[in-house]
Amino acid sequence: MELLPPLEPFLIPGPAGHIDGRLEWPPARGGAPGVPRFLAVFGHPHPNHRGTMQNSVVVHGARALAKLGGAVARFNFRGVGRSEGHYDQGRGELSDFLAVAAWLRARWPGTRALLAAGFSFGSLRALEAAAKGAADAYLGVAPPFDLAHRSPLPRLERPAALVLAQRDELVAMPTDAQLAERFADLRAIEVVPDAGHLFFGRINEVAAAIARAAEQLLPTE
């Protein structure tokens, strides 16, 4: 049987009230959780379309990162589950993402790299957080760059990687020109074959793609 990373529930103060989340630790060694190689925050899909931290891509993506040695926080944006507050068009959700990233940094102060990751709506908040300097690198899963946004998305100067769905019915495959405009340092693009936007039936494949993409962003041990 596959050994899953240890899981720690958390409820922390946020800008709109408590933020409910789960911390995936690196796999246990000798009965205790491993020391994190890096830190990561993983944002979930759109709250108004039933997105939660229990989304399969988010859960398996966070586990994949934890197995690489990360302490990975997945959480509910405001107004979802036990997280307090109300949906805020992405503005407040970015503040939630930043609050979780700051909590991780405070828990493990020092030089560990922090990876901002997310799926769909969550990938946009992760991009904004990385652009604000809250993370050292960015990993976006099926980011909806071509949809209407409340404000222009920033160009990212930090290292980045993408995991895309080959048959995404909601998001067009980005062109080379669009990627060059969006990212200064795009290190990996993983395309999951025959996958739609939600990756139904392709969870193992997307988790493996997330792990491969993340390896291109993480510092060597």
Image (tube, grey):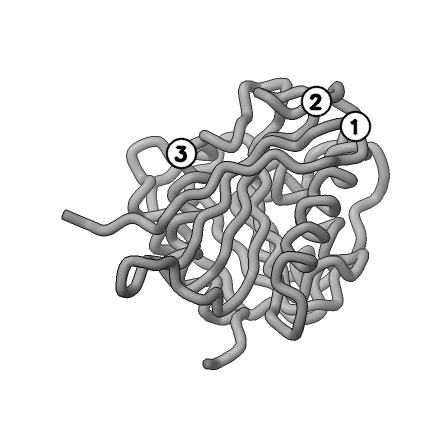
User: From this viewpoint, is residue 48 visible?
Assistant: yes
- Mark 2, secondary structure of its residue: loop
Image position, residue 49 (x, y; %):
58, 19
164 or 24: nearer the eye? 24
Amino acid beneath label 1: Ala
Q: Which residue is mark 1?
A: 16
Callout 3–callout 2 Cβ contact below 8 Å: no
- Numbered disc 1: secondary structure: loop
Measuring 50% from the left and 45% from the top, which residue is drawn there? Answer: 23
Contact check, label 2 and label 1, Cβ < 8 Å: yes
- Would you identify the image quadrant in which residue 55 lies? top left
Q: Nearer the viewer, residue 209 or 58?
A: 58
Q: Residue at x 68, y 55 (%)?
A: 178
Residue 130 is left or right of residue 143, and the answer is right
Residue beneath disc 2? 84
- Residue 51, labelled with which disc? none
Q: Is residue 14 left or right of residue 68?
A: right
Q: Which mark is residue 56?
A: 3
